[in-house]
Amino acid sequence: MRYNCHGGDLYLPLLLIHLHPSCTILAGTVNIGVAWWLLSTVDDICHNPDSPWTCPNDHVFFDASVIWGLVGPKRIFGLLDDYSALNWLFLGGILGPLIIWLSHETFPNQSWIPLINLPVLLGATAYMPPATALNYNSWILVGAIFNFFIFRYRKKWWQRYNYILSAALDAGVAFMAVLIHFSLGMENRSLHWWGSGPGIDTEHCELATCPTAKGLLVEGCPAF
């Protein structure tokens, strides 16, 4: 896995190859330092119900450590457990590419069938625990506009500006995060509108925090 990530870049200039480990060390050190500073200076940063900061990635890694370490996958994905049906997805992952290949062989004139890439589609769902439907809809909208319509009808613009736009969007998120921190976070100010508040973590769906295990009864939640 590491060779596939870094060995594929050996065709790059030697300077960039040397920058890989140094930039990784620098970025990792800065990330750990900032995270440690925030966790030690902001009380309940990941648990305050009135805060939009819920540390979704950290919660995902914590839950994964509990599932695969503390509890063990056998007690969660075993034959008699609640999530045993998820094992059928392994069969779907095996048969999915085969079905697409057979469809392409059966209908060779359909140009859209070879465009289906199941590893990309299924791999994108790996971000779904921390990412929400709002994130995916935004990605789909931006991707459809610039990588389909602009690519088809304004190809020269796409060739010159598309990847610059991608870098600008990434840089804009980082810049706004710093700007919001210094303008609002350090002054303990907050913006109250429909997109923020306690409901933002569940996308304004109150049932998203309800338990789904059988026999658990919580006021305001349906029973399963």
Image (cartoon, rainbow, N blue to C red):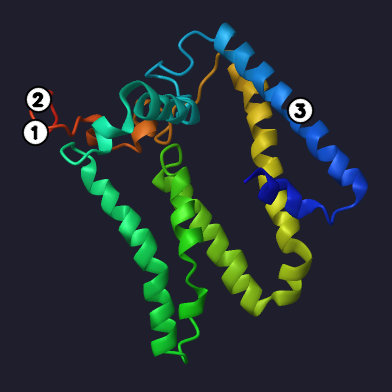
Question: For residue 217, which numbered disc appears in the image?
Answer: 2
Q: Camera-side residue: 23 or 183?
A: 23
Q: In which quarter of the image is the C terminus?
A: top left
Single out the mark in the foreground, 2 or 3: 3
**Three-letter amino acid code at the position of disc 3:** Ile
**Three-letter amino acid code at the position of disc 2:** Leu
| Residue marked by disc 1 | 223
**Image height check: is 150 above or below 123?**
below
Residue drawn at (19%, 41%), measured in percent from left and top? 79
Q: How crowded is mark 3: few (under 14 residues within 10 Å), some or many (20 or more)?
A: few
> Are the two marked residues, 3 and 1, in contact with CB atoms closer than 8 angstroms?
no
Single out the mark in the foreground, 3 or 1: 3
Q: Camera-side residue: 130 or 167?
A: 130
Question: For residue 25, which numbered disc appears in the image?
Answer: 3
Q: Distance between the residues labelled 1 and 2?
A: 6 Å
Is residue 139 in view? yes
Is residue 186 in view? no
Q: Where is residue 185 in the image (x, y as percent from the top left)?
A: 59, 18
> Looking at the rendering, which quadrant does residue 220 occupy?
top left
> Are the two marked residues, 1 and 2, in contact with CB atoms closer than 8 angstroms?
yes
Residue drawn at (32%, 33%), measured in percent from left and top? 73
